[in-house]
Image (cartoon, rainbow, N blue to C red):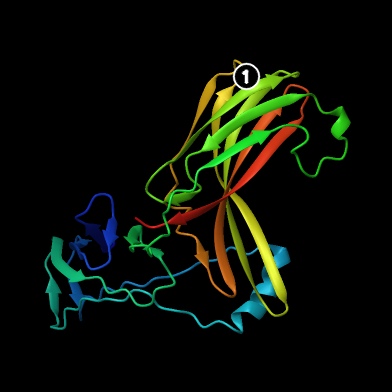
Amino acid sequence: METILDIKIKRANKVYYAGEMFSGVVVISSKYSVQHQGVLLTMEGLVNLQLSAKSIGMFEAFCNSVKPIQVLTSSIEIVKPGKFPSGKTEISFEFPLHVKGNKVLYETYHGVFVNIQPQKGKSTPSPVDFTITPETLQNVKERASLPKFLIRGHLNSTNCVITHPLTGELVVEYSEAAIKNTELHLVRVETCGCVEGYARNATEIQNIQIADGDVCRSLSVPIYIIFPRLFTCPTLETTNFEVEFEVNIVVLLHDDHFITENFPLKLCGI
């Protein structure tokens, strides 16, 4: 049997706040005795970027003007040499989290979430009412061929606390064509660059069906999105790098026409 080293965190949801105590155990499992010179535990804050082919050259230029920032670091060490007995040994540890810098608002490492209080005013509610008709749509080549429709609704706020849901409602007042499907698409938009230019990459991170089939007219359909924690973070805006979010309301008609309306979102910490 190979030696297995694991970290078990006492807090089940793995969510911590700046200044809180992080605690758990290091579990070492082995059938035989294991020689050791010490156990070192390290925490680091990392940002991993997935680059598309069109943005690799742009990102290389971006890296030349930006230095990496280490956000979290902490360690535990057993310095006395010795042996672990056979079976399982648990080594308890606890230490405070220290956060450096104020631009990176959200970091994960080994599934641990660190929430930092947002700046004042970041989460001020900003409700949005919308009306969608053939005349309000953009990037339409043959507007005259579209069926007539009228869709109303509202979002309770486009400034969102990341742990709270995005809510609102949608009402189909009128539509000549039958509706096949109604969905909400949550999109993450990453932009990086420098004086040579900028590369922008949009990724759909969540797709929610809010209505199936031809919904009743003048019926309120609720909008409710819980932000996925592995794919979202507070909105980040710097000189050379941005992480932003959008929600798209997508209505598919039976004649295969897509109706799409886009709403930028600003996410903030708790």
Tell me: residue 178, above or below residue 164.
Answer: above
Whether residue 1 is visible to the viewer of this picture, yes or no, is no
Occupied quadrant, residue 129: top right
Where residue 220 appears, as percent x and y from the top left, is 52, 23
Q: Is residue 172 left or right of residue 106?
A: right
Residue sitting at x 44%, y 53%: 230
Residue sitting at x 78%, y 35%: 135
Residue sitting at x 63%, y 78%: 62
- Residue situated in front as seen by the camera: 122 or 210: 122
Badge 1: residue crowd in 10 Å (few <14, some 14–19, many ≥20): few
Where residue 23 appears, as percent x and y from the top left, is 18, 63
Q: Quadrant of the C terminus?
A: bottom left
Residue sitting at x 44%, y 72%: 103
Q: Is residue 193 left or right of residue 160?
A: right
Q: Quadrant of the N terminus?
A: bottom left
Where residue 196 appears, as percent x and y from the top left, is 73, 79
Occupied quadrant, residue 113: bottom left
Q: Is residue 216 left or right of residue 74?
A: right
- Residue situated in front as seen by the camera: 29 or 142: 142
Tell me: residue 173, above or below residue 139.
Answer: above
Where residue 261 appears, as percent x and y from the top left, is 66, 40
Tell me: residue 190, above or below residue 128.
Answer: below
- Residue situated in front as seen by the camera: 98 or 221: 221
The amino acid beneath tag 1 is Gly
Whether residue 21 is visible to the viewer of this picture, yes or no, is yes
Circle 1 SS class: loop
Tell me: residue 235, above or below residue 257.
Answer: below
**Residue assigned mark 1:** 213
